[in-house]
Amino acid sequence: MFNLILFGPPGSGKGTQSEKLIAKFGLRHLSTGDILRSEIRNGTALGLEAKSLMDQGQLVPDAVVIGMIRSALEHNPEARGFLFDGFPRTNAQADTLDALLAEKKTAINIVLALQVSKSELVKRLLNRGLTSGRTDDVNEAIIGSRIEEYERKTAAVADHYKKVNKVVYIPGEGSVEEIFRKLCDEIEEKLKSKK
Ligand code: AP5
């Protein structure tokens, strides 16, 4: 199996690049944000619990997202690998992910961390908010809270994987294609060293 975490702050391009990477490498895309938005659309109890936190730009409790990831891993026994997008976002989530993958006799192979300046993140998200209908993109205050949550709780997840030498930083500004090529280069390099 080949397992990759696409890491980075809100608006850094995780979702955009994930779509292209799963198509190229045949990985299963697991985006906790997408799963949560689908729960909200379906009006489930979990969606209701998550909605008010997401609308304020705050993280959903660890137990909720860990349950979602556990279930997704169980339901995809045939996957040749996973691309985790927006997960893990806390050290507790990272510890649990490591344990869940160890149960499957696998592990995270690489963490690709997109680096984008704060002003560019705000610009991208406000721009998407004009048409996306995403309630967490509507104004600068909510976008600011998301970035703050990232800085307070999520940035440290990179240190968790740095300790085991798995993090590669990728400049996340420039054209989508240019960034995609850099991500592909790192993945291909890693795949070669696995053989
Ligand atoms: P989530 O859905 O994960 O959102 P996010 O991390 O805030 O990221 P975004 O989807 O906004 O950005 P992205 O990095 O994917 O960039 P994208 O490609 O979309 O999480 C939403 C919420 O759910 C969280 O706030 C939290 O409440 C909850 N949640 C989710 N996971 C959780 C977890 N594990 N634990 C707890 N809570 C959790 O691009 C953004 C925009 O930029 C797009 O318009 C795109 O077209 C544009 N763009 C992309 N690349 C470029 C480029 N190179 N140049 C110019 N524009 C670009």
Image (cartoon, rainbow, N blue to C red):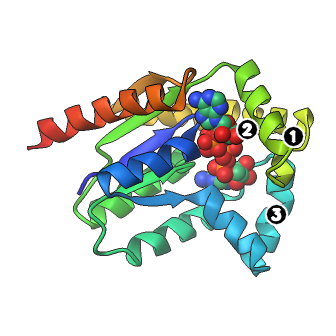
Disc 2 and disc 1: Cα gap in Å?
Answer: 11 Å
Where's the C terminus, which quadrant?
A: top left
Where's the N terminus, which quadrant?
A: bottom left
Q: Which of marks 2 and 1 is in front?
A: 1
- Marks 1 & 3, CB-CB < 8 Å contact: no
The residue carrying pointer 2 sits among few (fewer than 14), some (14 to 19) or many (20 or more) residues within 10 Å by Cα, namely some
- Residue 185 to residue 79: above or below: above
Residue type pointed to by label 2: Glu
Q: Is mark 1 within 8 Å of ligand 1?
A: no
- Residue 65 to residue 135: above or below: below
In this view of the protein, can residue 3 be seen by the observer?
no
> Quick one: SS at disc 3?
helix
Horizontally, residue 144 falls left or right of residue 192, namely right
Horizontally, residue 178 falls left or right of residue 145, namely left
Horizontally, residue 54 falls left or right of residue 104, namely right
Residue that carries the numbered disc 2 in the rendered image: 149
Residue that carries the numbered disc 3 in the rendered image: 51
Residue type pointed to by label 3: Lys
Q: Which quadrant would residue 115 be assigned to in this image?
A: top right
Q: Which residue is drawn at 86% across and 43% down?
A: 130
- Residue 180 to residue 64: above or below: above
Q: Residue 142 carries which label?
A: 1
Percent coordinates x, y for residue 170 in the rendering: 45, 24
> Quick one: SS at disc 1?
helix
Q: Which quadrant would residue 33 be assigned to in this image?
A: bottom right
In this view of the protein, can residue 158 be seen by the observer?
yes
Q: Is mark 2 within 8 Å of ligand 1?
A: yes
Q: Which sits earlier in the primary sequence, circle 2 or circle 3?
A: 3
Q: Which sits earlier in the primary sequence, circle 1 or circle 3?
A: 3
Q: Nearer the viewer, mark 2 or mark 3?
A: 3
Residue type pointed to by label 1: Ile
Q: Which sits earlier in the primary sequence, circle 2 or circle 1?
A: 1
